[in-house]
Amino acid sequence: MSKMILAMNVSLDGYVDDLAGSFVMGLPSPELFDYWTQTVRSHAAALYGRRMYEVMRYWDEDRPEWTAPLRDFAVAWRRLPKWVVSRTLSQVGPNATLIAENIEAEVRALKTRVDGTISVSGPSLAGLMTGLGLIDEYHLVLRPFVLGEGKPFFHGARPPLRLCSTDRIDDQTVCLVYAPA
């Protein structure tokens, strides 16, 4: 049985770092980028919502301007088996499987089949998985910015959480790991 985690960059005011947040928060430090590369390498699978998957498809094809760290991340991301939850997509890219029907049953079955960590990416999907009680840990990669708007890390009230660990990633970023209490 796998452990399902929600791990995303989040601003001090609780919004996830997506394309709009990246503009405000800027590029990640080398340490933070390496943290995400190592994180992706350590996962057994990934579960994406449609929008987040479409953003991440950037890593499907090599680009000549990439540095070695960018290529390393792309290699790690490409090798990771991915499941994409979408009722609007008709197909997905390499190493990805579409989940369009029976989402809860499919994700529960995936959780029993995969050995290791499954990451959940995408705020709307995260809200659905949280509501179904499928998230085992929340990894908030807290960045020192206030966005003031956007997609919230948490959708709706959450049962009490307990702090499991804190890790400093760079001189401005920490990862807070919580689990349902």
Image (tube, grey):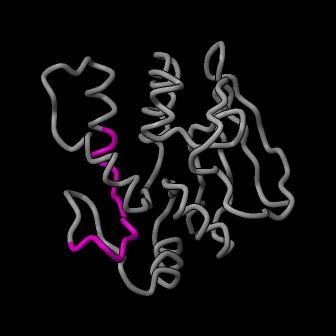
Image side of residue 117 versus residue 133, left or right: left
Seen in the picture, residue 8 relative to 46 is either above or below; the reply is: above
**Residue 7 colored in magenta in the image:** no
Residue 70: where, in percent of width, then height?
A: 30, 25
Residue depicted at 57% across the width and 69% down the height:
1
- Residue 177, by quadrant, is top right
Residue 96: where, in percent of width, then height?
A: 28, 62
Q: Nearer the viewer, residue 14 or 81?
A: 14
Q: For the view shown, which residue lies furthest in the left direction?
A: 64
Magenta residues? 76-90
- Residue 168, by quadrant, is top right
Q: Nearer the viewer, residue 179 or 113?
A: 179
Residue depicted at 52% across the width and 26% down the height:
24
Residue 160: where, in percent of width, then height?
A: 87, 59
Seen in the picture, residue 126 relative to 167 is either above or below; the reply is: below
Q: Nearer the viewer, residue 69 or 59?
A: 59
Seen in the picture, residue 114 relative to 78 is either above or below; the reply is: below
Residue 14: where, in percent of width, then height?
A: 69, 42
Image side of residue 60 versus residue 52, left or right: left
Q: Nearer the viewer, residue 178 or 76?
A: 178
Q: For the view shown, which residue lies furthest in the front direction?
A: 148
Residue depicted at 46% across the width and 16% down the height:
30
Quadrant of image for the C terminus:
bottom right
Seen in the picture, residue 24 relative to 61 is either above or below; the reply is: above
Count of all numbered marks drawn on residues in the image: 0
**Residue 87 colored in magenta in the image:** yes
Image side of residue 79 versus residue 109, left or right: left
Image side of residue 63 versus residue 38, left or right: left
Residue depicted at 12% across the width and 22% down the height:
64
